Structure formats: C-alpha cells, structure tokens
Image (cartoon, rainbow, N blue to C red):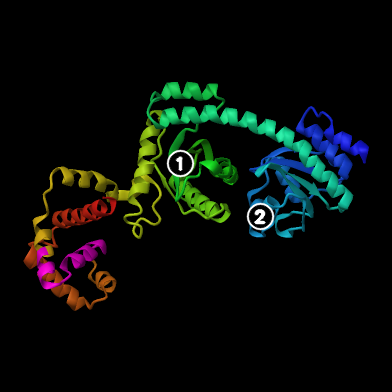
Amino acid sequence: MNRKKELFDGHYDSLETLADAISEVLQCPITIEDAGHRLLAYSSHERQIDPARTATIVGRRVPEHVVQSLWQGGIMHRLLQSPEPVKIEAIADVGLGRRVAVAVRKNDDVLGYIWVMENERELDAEAIGHLAKAALAVRTKLLHHRMLARQEEEGRQDFFWQMLTGHLSSHETIRDKAKKLGLTLPDSYNVIVMQFSKDVGDIQQQLYDMMAFRPSARIVLRAVDRNRLILLFGTEREQSPEKAVGQFIEAMAAQFGERLAGRPAVTGGAGSFYSSYALVETSYREALEVLDIKPVFAERLENVHVYHELGLYRHLPAIWQSKEKHPYGHRGLMKLREYDRYNNSCLTETLERFLACDCNAKDAAVALHVHTNTLTYRLKRITEIGGIDLNDADQKISVYLELQAEKYGKLKS
C-alpha cells in the first residue's frame, strides 16, 4: 500500500503517464476528462472496451448522448455532489459499461473527472480508496491545465471584445490577429447572445463546459457580460445556418435551465450572418435588438431567433424613436380611441386583432370570441368613425405599424 501511495505522490511528466499509473494500480482502464467532458488522457488497454470508451477516445470527448443520459439518470448530480467515488451501473442504450467515477475538485470547484471501467474487474473498497488518492494527484495536473487554458481564454476574450465594441473593424486586421492567436475563423459567422435572469459571471466556466457538446455548432469566441453569454457562432457549408442557430439557442436554453442551480430563466437572440469580420459589432447589436423586441411580442415571435426573422418588428424601435421626437398621432386611431373611451367599446382592439389575423374575418372573430356578424358590424363602424379604408393596403400597413410601435414604446418605457 505504501508503494502505491508513493506512486501517486511521485512526479509524472504528463497526464498520460499518470493515467497509466492509476490504471496499473486499479487494474482497470481509465480516462481523465476536464469539467466539460473533453478527454485529456486515457490509459492503454489490452482488455475489451465498451463503445462509449471507444467513441470518447476517437472523438476526444465523451459523446453528447452519453453525457445527456448521465444527466437524465441523475448520475452527474450524484457525481457533482459526492466527494467520494461513485459507482455507476451500465447503461446499455448508450454503450456505457459499469464505471466508477470521481470528480476532481479544488474546494467546491470541479476541475474534471476520472472514469474507471469496471467491465472485467469490480473495484473493492481498497481500490476505491486508491482512486480517491489518485484524484488528488490528478488535481495538481488539472489546476495547471486550467491555468494555461484561462490565460489563453483571456487573450481571446480581449480580442472578441475589441470586435464587439468596434475597436477592431478591419477585416484583414482581425484575420491576422486571429491567426496569431491560433484561431481559424469560419467563412460565415454571426453573434449569439444568451440572456439570463441573473448575473452568470460566477458560473462562466460551467457555461463554457456545457457548450462543449454541440457538434453542428462552432463556437469560435465567447465572453460573459453580467447576465449575458456572448458567442461568435460559425458554420461551415451549412445549408441552413439560421436553422442551426435556432436549434442551438433552443437546445442551450433547455440545457442551461435543466442543469444550472436555481434554474435561471434564459432566452437567446442572434444577429445576421456575415462574411466580413468588420461587421461583428453590427451582428452583436442586432442580437441585442432581438432580445429587446422579443419579450414585447412574445406570442408572435416565440420561434424567432435571428435578427432578419423579426421582419417588420425590427423597424419598431426606429419608428417609436421617431414618434417620440415628432409626437404626432394617427388621426383615425385617435378618433377610434376617443369613441371607445366615451362608449366603452373596443373598436381599436378589434382593428388590431383583425390586422394581426391578416384581415381574415373568420380567424379574427375566433380570436375575439365574437360572431362573424358582430365583427363585420365593428369593421363597418371602424371605417365610418376612423375613416380607415380596410381595402387600402397602405392604410392597413400604416395603422398596424402605428399600433405595434405604440405597444413597443409602452412596454419599453
């Protein structure tokens, strides 16, 4: 036992050497992963291994479906909460054999994990004690690994913020600087902002680790600003990049909500895709505008994630700003509101719903919970009182934009 203790207390040139030493003591294949389940080292193996281990070694990370299964089965919660090694039964559906795992910690901070394959040999109490000691040796290596990773991350974040704020606005300069930082920029990109209901600076690394499993997404750069996670999202030869963005935002919102303590509310917005890196700030501003407008029109924009998908709604902030500078009112709407006020009627609401239903009387009547005859009578009164010609496309568009801009302004003020 003393020999084994000294073995783990000794000097190891690399994590790979340490992994082989731990495997030799436990007589089982092992892997060492960071907190985002990226493979850092694995022991050599002569015995039969399961599909999950094979896929992890080939892909240099634990497959997403395996991690998802571990979360859904409550295994990751047990592992994160337990200071001791945890026994894990086989999960045949994802090709995972029996394991013993331990979280490698620095105080309450999880640095990574050691996973031990138990397919041919079950660890006894003594071996589990050795695994706990091995975690202490691995901790030193992972602390050094994280320090180097953070230094690299800080340099990349500074670079990203220079683009987001417009301090770097030359496409060629950005390309050159990215190359010096070891970054390969995609041909097409956009900026995604995930907005939380509370500040997330203290769980920044945890957020980054959770994003490691999106094979269709390429997160090139990332930063946190109080309650916002900001990402430079790239796709290569993607037939529908907007669809990929929408799927990414929905998947990450669900994952953050499921796995973060306190379950903070989270929503996402994305700017347009560009090929010139001189327009990073533009895409960022567009993403913020999506987050600004979506809550006001939550029902109609529920499935909208990318700026250009806002359609006419993206013009509402500018229309409202113009109205504040030049406080004129639509004369027809003013007449309808005055009539509603004195007669306790709802002609203005009827008009808005009718226009929102694309002037489909049947749909509007259902939405208003009235008979179509009642709706027809109200529309006639709207034309008589407000002087609004509902057969004139220009008038209908003008009135609808006026109503939506006012709604935006009221909820934002």
126 or 36, nearer to the observer: 126
What's the magenta region?
Answer: 338-359
Instruction: Measuring from the top left, give residue 321's x and y in whole percent.
Output: 21, 44
- Residue 267 lies, with reference to residue 226, above or below; the image says below
Magenta-highlighted stretch: main secondary structure? Answer: helix
Whether residue 147 is visible: yes
In the displayed structure image, the side of residue 327 where residue 408 appears, left or right: right
Q: Report the amino acid beneath label 1.
A: Arg
Mark 2 burial class by Cα count in 10 Å: few <14, some 14-19, many 20+: few
CB atoms of marks 2 and 1 within 8 Å: no
The structure residue drawn at horizontal position 28% and vertical position 54%, both measured from the top left corner, is 411
Distance between the alpha carbons at the discs numbered 2 and 1: 26 Å
Instruction: Measuring from the top left, give residue 375's x and y in whole percent.
Output: 19, 73
Instruction: Measuring from the top left, give residue 403's x and y in whole percent.
Output: 20, 56
Mark 1 burial class by Cα count in 10 Å: few <14, some 14-19, many 20+: some
61 or 88, nearer to the observer: 88
Where residue 165 is drawn, which disc sits there?
none
Under circle 2, the secondary element is helix
In the displayed structure image, the side of residue 145 where residue 227 appears, left or right: left
| Residue occupying the far front of the picture | 107
Q: Report the amino acid beneath label 2.
A: His
Where residue 77 is drawn, which disc sits there?
2
- Residue 66 lies, with reference to residue 203, above or below; the image says below
- Residue 345 belongs to the span the image colors magenta: yes
Q: Considering the image in quadrants, where does the N terminus appear?
A: top right
Q: How many marks?
A: 2
Q: Earlier in the sequence, mark 2 or mark 1?
A: 2
Q: For mark 1, what is the residue?
A: 226
The structure residue drawn at horizontal position 24% and vertical position 76%, both measured from the top left corner, is 370
- Residue 169 belongs to the span the image colors magenta: no
Instruction: Measuring from the top left, give residue 153's x and y in whole percent.
Output: 56, 31
Whether residue 359 is visible: no
